[in-house]
Image (cartoon, rainbow, N blue to C red):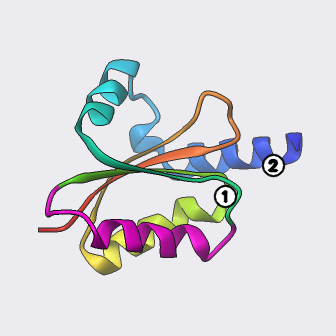
């Protein structure tokens, strides 16, 4: 399990240098605007993407979805998914436990 935790942390840090320095205040601001939360921990590819797509389809334009994943592939998969569909990936951050990643996605207009 330690190997997975290290790999997720390394993957997120390498891929997401832009959001690495977000403070707890900024995270709290995103959380205050969240319209829906999906805990996709334990699901493997392609399920996190499919569940995210389903959740976004049920939301209004510009509402924010917070997704928690443990699959390391979900970090890159959600980046590609948002680029292809027009949704806005606001941030991706590792959770405090180091085992999961939190993603904030704004639904397209």
Residue 59 locus on image (x, y percent): 24, 63
Of the pair 51 and 12, the residue shown nearer to us: 51
Residue 8 locus on image (x, y percent): 69, 48
> Helix, strand or loop at disc 1?
loop
> Helix, strand or loop at disc 2?
helix
Residue found at x 24% / y 74%: 86
Q: Residue furthest front?
A: 58
Of the pair 17 and 73, the residue shown nearer to us: 73
Tag 1–tag 2 contact (CB < 8 Å) = yes
Q: Which residues are magenta?
A: 44-62
Report the residue marked by disc 2.
Answer: 4
For residue 64, side relative to residue 61 (left or right): right
Q: Quadrant of residue 40?
A: bottom right
Of the pair 87 and 53, the residue shown nearer to us: 53
Of the pair 20 and 87, the residue shown nearer to us: 87
Report the residue marked by disc 1.
Answer: 72
Q: Quadrant of residue 10?
A: top right
Residue found at x 68% / y 35%: 98
What is the distance, in whole Å, between disc 1 and disc 2 at their CAs? 8 Å
Assess disc 2: are there few (<14), some (14-19) or many (≥20) residues with their C-alpha within 10 Å of its C-alpha. some
> The C terminus appears in which quarter of the rendering?
bottom left
Q: Residue furthest bottom?
A: 84
Number of callouts:
2
Residue 80 locus on image (x, y percent): 43, 73
For residue 58, side relative to residue 15 (left or right): left
Say whether residue 6 is magenta: no
Residue found at x 67% / y 59%: 71
Residue found at x 46% / y 65%: 78
Say whether residue 53 is magenta: yes
> The N terminus appears in which quarter of the rendering?
top right
Q: Relative to 62, does residue 87 appear above or below in the rendering?
A: below
Assess disc 1: are there few (<14), some (14-19) or many (≥20) residues with their C-alpha within 10 Å of its C-alpha. many
């Amino acid at each position: 399990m330690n190997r997975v935790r290290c790999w997720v942390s390394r993957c997120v840090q390498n891929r997401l240098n832009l959001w690495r320095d977000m403070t707890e205040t900024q995270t709290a601001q995103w959380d205050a605007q969240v319209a829906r939360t999906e805990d996709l921990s334990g699901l493997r590819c392609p399920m996190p993407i499919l569940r995210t797509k389903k959740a976004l389809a049920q939301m209004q334009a510009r509402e924010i979805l917070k997704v928690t994943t443990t699959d390391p592939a979900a970090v890159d998969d959600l980046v590609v998914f948002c680029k292809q569909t027009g949704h806005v990936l606001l941030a991706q951050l590792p959770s405090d436990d180091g085992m999961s990643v939190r993603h904030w996605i704004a639904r397209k207009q």
